[in-house]
Image (spheres, rainbow, N blue to C red):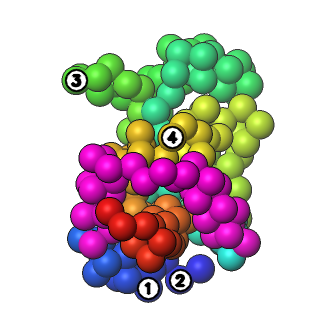
Amino acid sequence: MDLKKFSKKAAKNKPKLVKFLKKLDKIVPEGMDAVVKEVDEEIWKDIDCLECANCCKTMTPTYTKEDIKRISQHLRMTPKDFKNKWLYQDEKNKDWMNRSTPCQFLGDDNKCSIYEVRPDDCAGFPHHTKKDFDLYNDTYIQNVHRCPATYEMVSKLRKRIEKEYEW
Ligand code: SF4
Ligand code: SF4
């Protein structure tokens, strides 16, 4: 995947996608869940995360207490040493996050070296069908120029909604 090309295209189209997501904050078309499910299935036919890994290269997951316990155990470290080595705690919301990007667990082959015990946040990313789609609008606004899957999802959803609904 050509991430430079993607980044350019996404930056150019981001304003109209953000406008759509903000409108979705106020009005949720009837039957939205079914459309989201359909579009989500469609976009994954053309996207291979192993050719991308842009989330692991440019963003940080948030680590829950359970994540830290599980991963440090897997690495035969204490949770304290694990945190000291790689994480910092956000002052405002107290979330534990990676100190640097790309993620220290990302391999040259774009594979996660702790895949089976990775943070829940990574396992659920990009959160398209985790909850009602509109509950994650702020997350999509943050990610739409970084995650090709979210970019395709929001672009296709926008086209469908604007074509099929009066809103
Ligand atoms: S979730 Fe998005 S950013 Fe992460 S690897 Fe897949 S397409 Fe790329
Ligand atoms: S823990 Fe694994 S999946 Fe999560 S950001 Fe790091 S490399 Fe990516």
Q: What's the distance in space between the residues labelled 1 and 2, CA to CA?
A: 5 Å
Cα distance in 3D space between marks 4 and 2: 31 Å
* N-terminal label among 4 and 2: 2
Residue at point 72% right, 32% down? 117
Considering the whole magenta stretch, tell me its main secondary structure.
Answer: helix
Q: Mark 3 touching mark 1, by CB under 8 A?
A: no
To which quarter of the image does residue 37 belong? bottom right
Would you say the residues marked 3 and 2 are in contact, meaning their CB atoms lie under 8 Å apart? no
- Name the residue nearer the viewer: 28 or 8: 28
Residue labelled with disc 1 = 5
Residue drawn at x 61%, y 65% as measured from the top left: 39
Mark drawn on residue 166: none
**Which residue position is annotated with label 4?**
132
Q: Which numbered mark, 3 or 4, is in the foreground of this view?
A: 4
What residue would you read off at disc 2? 2
Residue range (magenta): 16-45
Q: Earlier in the sequence, mark 3 or mark 4?
A: 3
Residue 8 colored in magenta in the image: no
Return the x and y of residue 131 as percentages of the image width and height.
54, 37
Classed neighbour count for the residue bearing mark 4: other residues with Cα under 10 Å, few (<14), some (14–19), many (≥20): some
Whether pointer 1 and pointer 4 mark residues with C-beta atoms closer than 8 Å, the reply is: no
Tag 3: amino acid: Lys
Decide: marks 1, 2 in contact (CB < 8 A)?
yes
Q: Is residue 22 left or right of residue 101?
A: left
State the image coordinates of residue 110 (x, y, percent, origin top left).
Answer: 66, 62
Q: Is residue 129 left or right of residue 100?
A: right
Mark nearest the camera among 4 and 2 is 4
Q: Which residue is mark 3?
A: 92
Per the image, label 2 sits on a secondary structure element best described as: loop
Q: Which sits earlier in the primary sequence, circle 3 or circle 1?
A: 1
